[in-house]
Image (tube, rainbow, N blue to C red):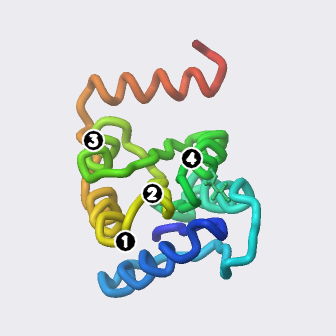
Amino acid sequence: MIALGCDHGGYGLMQEVIGHLEKRGLEYCNYGTYSNEAVDYADYAKRVADAVAKGEADRGILICGTGIGISIAANKVHGIRAALCGDCFSAQATREHNDANILAMGARVLGPGLALKIVDTFLDTPFSGDERHVRRIAKITAIEEGQN
Ligand code: RB5
């Protein structure tokens, strides 16, 4: 299950992402927003981040104008590693190295062709599981829990 969320800036690109996931036969849950009307990106970041953190979704995809606000907000939720990606190399590396559980993108930054390739890369790349990456992620969690 993939949790989806966007603000008005990301709404158009999210429709492309939804069409793409449907073509691929992937299950998703759309947490909105559902139109071009102006909304606050943090509200949608929280809905998707909560769904991923609670295990209701395996991954999340968040889109705002730049991808910046919505990724900053998502990363405030415990257990979330949201990665803002503008290229496939980063999308692959953040899965392999950071075990990122949310992909963030900027609809005013990316065209739909590249964005959908980034989505595929993010969804299809497994975490490497390498000891050094597990250790580094544990240190991120320690910071989050105030144990650093
Ligand atoms: C909305 O205008 C815009 O600020 C938002 O989509 C995003 O880019 C914020 O980081």
Nearer mark to the viewer, of 2 and 3: 2
Specify which label sits upstream in the sequence, 3 or 1.
Answer: 3
Q: Residue at x 67, y 81 (%)?
A: 35
Tell me residue 76's x, y (percent).
66, 40
C-alpha gap between disc 3 and disc 4: 19 Å
Q: Is mark 1 within 8 Å of ligand 1?
A: no
Name the amino acid type tagged 3.
Ala
Tell me residue 75's x, y (percent).
59, 41
Residue to which mark 1 is pinned: 112
Q: Residues within 10 Å of mark 1 (few under 14, many from 20)?
A: some
Q: Is mark 4 within 8 Å of ligand 1?
A: yes
User: Which quadrant does the C terminus fall into?
Assistant: top right
C-alpha gap between disc 1 and disc 2: 10 Å
Nearer mark to the viewer, of 3 and 1: 1
Q: Secondary structure at mark 1?
A: helix
Q: Residues within 10 Å of mark 3 (few under 14, many from 20)?
A: some
Name the amino acid type tagged 4.
Ile
Residue to which mark 2 is pinned: 109
Nearer mark to the viewer, of 3 and 4: 4
Residue to which mark 4 is pinned: 68
C-alpha gap between disc 4 and disc 1: 18 Å
Name the amino acid type tagged 1.
Pro
C-alpha gap between disc 3 and disc 1: 21 Å
Tell me residue 111's x, y (percent).
37, 67
66 relative to 24 in the view: left or right: right
Specify which label sits upstream in the sequence, 4 or 1.
Answer: 4
Q: Are marks 4 and 2 in contact (CB under 8 Å)?
A: no
Q: Residues within 10 Å of mark 2 (few under 14, many from 20)?
A: few
Residue to which mark 3 is pinned: 93
Q: Secondary structure at mark 4?
A: helix
Q: Residue at x 65, y 74 (%)?
A: 32
Nearer mark to the viewer, of 4 and 2: 2
